[in-house]
Image: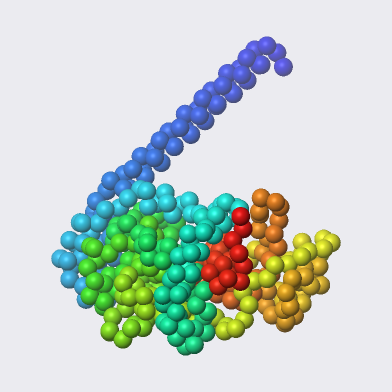
Amino acid sequence: MGKRGVTMKRILLHTLLIFGLATGLLSGAAQAQDNSDFFDQELLDRSSVQEFIDKMVSKHKFERKWMKKLFQDMKPRKKIVKAISNPAERKKWFQYKPIFIRKERVLGGIGFKKIHNGTLSRAHKEYGVPPEIITSIIGIETKYGMNTGKFRVIDSLATLAFNYPKRSKFFLGELEHFLLLTREEELDPYKIRGSYAGAMGKPQFISSSYRNYAVDYDGDNKRDLWRSNSDIIGSVANYFKRHKWKANEPIAVKAKVSGNGWKKATLNKLKPQHTVGDLRLMGIKPTQPLDDNMPANLLVLDTKNGKEYWITLHNFYVITRYNHSSMYAMAAFQLSQLINGTTTLEK
């Protein structure tokens, strides 16, 4: 190739590079502008909001005027999208564990279990869910009610239903459930506060779970997941029972692995993919006696000192129905053991 050809090629590449950078920057700027406009646009100006209002009016007989006023008062927030896009469950186990497995949370759980022993025992008898598991869930969710959330639920749900396309269908459903819940339970939708995802009360039930699984466990004809510890305990127990909790069965057991056969196991799935017997044949042995016919998974956790191996069972999977994370379920399980005195806190 001659000098002229080389020069022309360089000019062409330089032009393409500049064009590519420019269009990339413009695209990024345009996307940022689109996102900004998305939040700046009034909710009532959106066709998706009008369709939702139409549905609530025709299907559930809400007043259109009331619905429009509600949407005028909703305040979508960018930090809600940021929060849901970066959940703690994305951390490694050695980073995630200290968030929940802490001395104050263990002591709080021991105290909660002692104070509410009667109700917890009643729930254990009726639903089959151990007191320490119920207590652990409440402890992980809200530190036994100390932090039930500061976001207005209507703002959280409006943000995620209309400003978070990835999960908009789910949160549109939750917004529908929320409005029905407030009508059924005679709650003020403007005053209810919860998590960035719209979870409410000491056990952090989302609206659909509140409607489907919350119970009146103190007999006052209300399902109060903020102030009635009886309702809270009964509702958590009912949730697990309805998700097929098996009474008196183990949750998870530490395992030892040998050879390379264990690598054939389906790792870190929520629903059991194997049996304990299958895992044994792969060189994965439980450190406690387990029936070979039990459905099971291999869970591998990253610790500061290397890998940690666990055989997780059906009830572990049930815990993940509360929060779809194996690390959440493991934290709940380990906290329950500490509360019950089965294990001691590592120093």
The answer to whether any part of residue 268 appears in the image is yes
Asked if residue 238 lies left or right of residue 201, the reply is: right
The answer to whether any part of residue 162 appears in the image is no
Residue at horizontal 35 percent and vertical 39 percent from the top: 33
**Going by the picture, which residue comes out furthest to the left?**
65
The residue nearer to you, when weighing 332 against 177, is 332
Quarter of image, res 166: bottom left
Quarter of image, res 177: bottom left
**Going by the picture, which residue comes out furthest to the bottom?**
126
Residue at horizontal 47 percent and vertical 68 percent from the top: 109
**Going by the picture, which residue comes out furthest to the right?**
259
Location of residue 280 with respect to 35 vertically, above or below: below
Residue at horizontal 37 percent and vertical 52 percent from the top: 80
Q: Position of residue 29 (x, y in %)?
A: 40, 35
Q: Position of residue 172 (x, y in %)?
A: 35, 65
Quarter of image, res 176: bottom left
Q: Position of residue 220 (x, y in %)?
A: 28, 84
